[in-house]
Amino acid sequence: MRKAIAALCAGTMIAAPATTVAQDTPAAAIDLVNPLMGTDSSYELSYGNTYPAIALPFGMNAWTPVTGKMGDGWGYTYSAHRINGIKQTHQPSPWMNDYAAFALLPMTGALKVKEADRASWFSHKAEVSTAYGYKVYLADYDVTAEVAPTERAAQFRFTFPKTDQAHVLLDGYSGGSMVSIDMKRRRITGYVRNNHGGVPANFRNWFVAEFDHDFTVTRTFDGAGAVSPGNRAEGDHVGAVVSFATRAGEQVAVRVASSFISAEQAQRNLDREIGRDTFATTQAKAKAAWSRELDRIQVDDPDIDNRRTFYSALWRMLQFPRQFHEVDARGQQVHYSPYDGQVHAGPLYTDNGFWDTWRAVFPFFALMYPERDGEIMQGLVNTYRESGWLPEWASPGHRSVMIGSNSANLIADAYLNGVRGFDVNTLYEAMVKNATTSQGRPRDAKGKVLTAVGREGVELYNQLGYVPYDVGINESAARTLEYATADFSLSRLAAALGKNDDAGKYAAQAQNYRKLFDPQSGWMRGRNRDGSWSTPFNPYKWGDAFTEGNSVHYSWSVMQDVAGLIDLMGGREKFVARLDSVFSTPPIFDDSYYGQVIHEIREMQIVDMGQYAHGNQPIQHMIYLYDWAGAPWKAQFHARAVMRKLYSSAPDGYPGDEDNGQTSAWYVFSALGFYPVTPTVGQYAIGSPLFRRVRVTMPGGKLLTIEAQNSSRDNVYIQSATLNGATHDRPWLSRAALQAGGTLRFVMGPTPNKAWGAKAEAAPFSMSEGNGLIERR
């Protein structure tokens, strides 16, 4: 049923077969993207928590049809039946919600301005959602609405019936808005201020909407639904309506752009990005922009469903982080700072949670987009200069969400993997500040410290080697494990910059994970300030000492030293048995910390994979740890099982939150056959390549061909591998080898080759082995 729905729900895919068949002429990558993947979600259960974004890669703005209520994070849900607007959105996640949003809606007949009143019935059968645009028939008004995006602007095209009462409504939403109608210039201008935090007092999103038709009537309205004649309104919630008389089939075009800097900059963005382009031209440019990115990875495989899922996930991953900078009159990058409220030179990116994306999204950027990654890193330099701190969750400014010090991982990973074009010394200074003090962190509008910025409990961590359980700091064990991984990244960057004393100090702190390992239970565990274990202990208790997971999930968060973890767990055989137990243990859970079954728990429970909770990020790397323990064939089995069972291009196609591309990045990497586990070292643990052949255009134009001979639903096990004709018997690949191009060839089969990649000396990097701290068993 999922695959049939996937074919129906995306307009470009309606005619595509839902079965797995070979095609004489493979569909283009752009036409395999389904933006509705992951939209069948709710507060109770997530299958992605996505919306059909109408955007360009890393674009400042996106647009989306709206089926939900104003201010509701679930703005578009696949099960809904009515659309009340198409809004400019910057929402990275429903849990973060939106900011700077405003909506347009074409209407006919008697004017209705309240969301519930104006919402029109629609059908997915009359909805076309593509990677480069959106089209929907609004049945109550007999109007077809279309949108095509640029980075900071968009073109709308509304096809009306014959009527004397054709309208286009612009809703500024509540939270502060202003609209001004200029009949002579056929424009609506104004600003919106709605947000959910992370903005200074002068925050505004200025917009301009230019029409190609004269207005016959102009009106404004307020949040109570009161409509007034006139051309200007300002208040908590205002909007504008312009009206026309139209012939049957007459099209009204609207060009819209916005700016966080000024009204003049909004006009500049419109003129620069759309100018005199027609709707068709804007759409063609959007299609070309997405095709350039998607075509860098060309998949040749008879399974069209897998190809759809792959390109839909890749499309999603390339939307975040968003550019927050604009281009001024001199052609220079400038940005309004959501940190100090001033306009500064240079790039800035936002809408990203590093707790999620350091794991695979940023390693993908370092591998495939080093120039873009360098610009993102320079944006972090600007964030630090403007706020005094690195962001951990920015939307658009600092938000107090999630835990850790994961900015260190993606910064060090970028630099150690050859990314340049940013001030690494300033970022190193920022990383050290995170690791040494919690004083002076930014505060929210109510004066409350943003505990997600910097390291909560860092002084105690530096004193004891862990964040204590009993000092009022929640999720203490998870924080400790994440700080230790960040310390590893910090030590590696320090060494690369010649700061040898720091390198030694932070390498030692990277071993702090050992302080939480309980040899009696065999799991990581919260520890009190006096050194005693927190009690009672239940490894299946979610939250408490851990973050959106339990000890069974977080005990594997030792990416920097898997060999050290193997040693703690009693050697390779016992380690493999413990990994196996995650899948074989029933999905029992203790939700008492939350007082309810949170959606992450339910998503683990219902997929029949034991305790494996792929729908949340902390455990997503776990499958690949078999490569360190002499059982790569088990990584191959489980990686393929997760791809097959938990992902599809359908509206329920993700296994949980699709957070800023991370869950997509897991699929993209895993389908290629490898996955980044340890930050900074430039190694990728090998799983089970999904496709018969993939051609990857690396930075600089080098071509990497990945072949998986005989790959199929049953042939998931690697029998042998070669790289450029030479035998490859290690269960990992290096960044240098991948970026150099050539041919990576796997021979796949239905039964495991348990000898391939199993030798102890073939395992990927672990810091303990490099330092001579342990001997592998």
Image: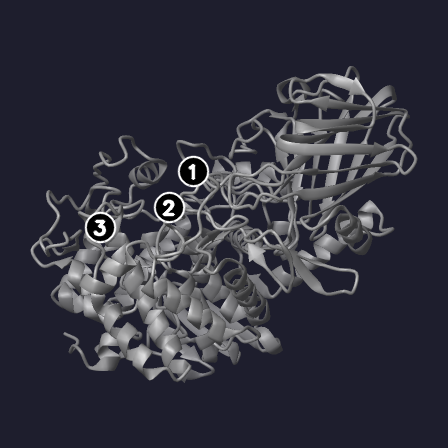
Left-right relation of 94 to 324? left
Per the model, the C-alpha gap separating discs 1 and 3 is 21 Å
Q: Is disc 1 placed on a helix, strand or loop?
A: loop
**Residue 243 at x, y percent in the picture:** 84, 25
The image quarter in which residue 119 lies: top right
How has the structure been colored for display?
one colour
Per the model, the C-alpha gap separating discs 2 and 1 is 8 Å
The amino acid pointed to by label 2 is Gly
Upstream in the sequence, badge 3 or badge 2?
3
Q: Quick one: quadrant of the C terminus?
A: bottom left
**Residue 401 at x, y percent in the picture:** 41, 46
Q: Is disc 2 placed on a helix, strand or loop?
A: loop
The answer to whether mark 2 and mark 1 are in CB contact below 8 A is yes
Q: Is disc 3 placed on a helix, strand or loop?
A: helix
The amino acid pointed to by label 3 is Val
Upstream in the sequence, badge 1 or badge 3?
1
**Residue 539 at x, y percent in the picture:** 17, 46
The amino acid pointed to by label 1 is Ser
